[in-house]
Image (spheres, rainbow, N blue to C red):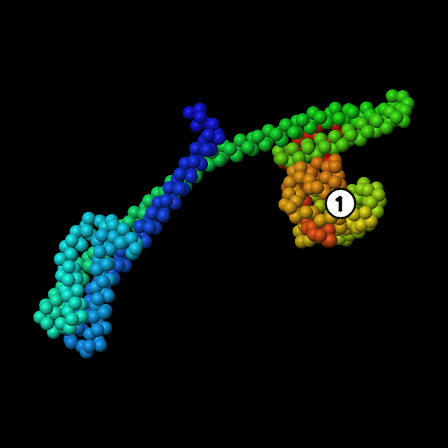
Amino acid sequence: MAIVNNLTTRYLISFGLLAVLIIGGLAWSEYQLATQERDSRVVNISGRQRMLSQKISKVVAELAAKPDAEMSARLTIELEDAIHLWERSQNALRFGDESLGITEGDSPAIGRMYENLNPVYERILNSGKTIVTLMKSDGVGSAEFSQAASEILSDENSFLTSMNNIVFAHDSEALARVTKSRIIVLFVDMSLLLFMIFLWFVAIRPALRKAEATDKAKTEFVSLASHQLRTPLTAISWYTEMILRGDMGKVLPEQRKYLEEIYGGDQRMIKLVNTLLDVSRLELGTFTVRPEPIQLKDVAESVLAELHPQIIVQKITLDKHYDSNLPVIPADPQLIRMIFQNLLSNAIKYASVNSKIRFDISIQGPNALIKVWNNGAEIPKEAQPKIFTKFFRDDLARQKDSDGNGLGLYIVKSIVENSGGKIWFESAENKGTTFYVTLPLDGMKKSPKVDPPPAGKEVLHK
């Protein structure tokens, strides 16, 4: 019992049984198809026996009418061929013939029908062969010919009646097998369905729940660790600022150099911790949305002012455009700011020196459409499907920004989609890269439950 309760063991046992059911079902289907093909051949050949019997009788009657020599020769060939096919078909039906696709296996009832029919069949067969022999020796007018022809013609109705019964019996048994097969297939299908339901509850759902619980535990751990890390990092930042300001006495140039290194490293750590907190809140569904009336243009201008020094350093020409009728919308200014910061800072970071960036905010139906374009290197095709995934950074990103963490676009995508919007991009060689974001003009919805910010400097930010 302890072994069966083990999730991995249950998983393996369940899928092993599923594989057995599927393989068994496929084998049964193949067997049924082969059986139905055989039944079809048997019924077809049984029907052909009746036609051959009628043809034999017809040719014998025509020969008895004493046609000319040319006609007699042709009818004799037809009779000989018909008798040959008739004999082979009858033997195949009674004893099997692999070349005709018929194996032995008629039911006892049909076997007895063939036994009852056999004397009639033998008489017609022998008489037919006698007539062929006589025709080849020009004995068409002999008493032996007349007797053989009479036996064939008199036995024809008896043979046809018996063969009809055999055909109907074959057809009836084939239909019974098909009906039985349908019932078995239905039973197998229902068994597979029930087993899949059983498999879901016994193996798949517990595995998914375990994976979700593990993922949630990891996210909660990251959130807790980030909270715990932020306090000492903030303290380091405050004390370093105090020393750099000279609150603790004069700072020597050599000391200032190292203190500034400490302060810069600490700020990068604080930024990373805040980003990890943002990610954990997004994944746990606890990040807060505090909408207020804002103008997208105002938030964008604030972010651009913050990024202006970088634009100057890289000698970038900024081409911006805002629709004149952009409305005020209810949205969280910090979340909107994060969207703009990530998209614009990435555009600046990956743009070429002395290049151009275009930034547009326009109205498109019920949405605001944000476009950010830069003419830097294209995003490699193999990297494009992973751009919005957590921690993903391609080679170009690592070269341009070694301190990045690959979380910015993941966070932006989560914010945009949780706000009812969409984000996508287009990137091609010699055409640059354009990111598009749509945000509904009716704004963001307030979080149903707002968790209070932790002590210290709070807010989702990049």
Q: Secondary structure at mark 1?
A: helix
Name the quadrant containing residue 457. Answer: top right
The x and y percentages for residue 108 are 19, 48
Figure quadrant of the C terminus:
top right
> Which residue is labeled 1 in the image?
350
Residue 194 showing in the rendered view? no
Q: Classify 10 Å Cα crowding around label 1: few (below 14), some (14-19), many (20 and above).
A: some
The residue lying at 74 percent from left, 43 percent from top is 346
Above or below, comparing residue 367 to residue 448 in the picture: below
| Residue 433 % position (x, y) | 72, 49
Q: Is residue 405 visible?
A: yes
Q: Position of residue 262 (x, y in %)?
A: 80, 27
Vertical placement of residue 401 versus 69, above or below = above
**Seen in the image, is 311 located left or right of residue 155?**
right
Which amino acid type is shown beneath numbered disc 1? Tyr
- Which residue is rendered at x = 21% and y = 53% of the image? 94
Residue 179, given in percent of the width and then of the height, sits at 30, 49
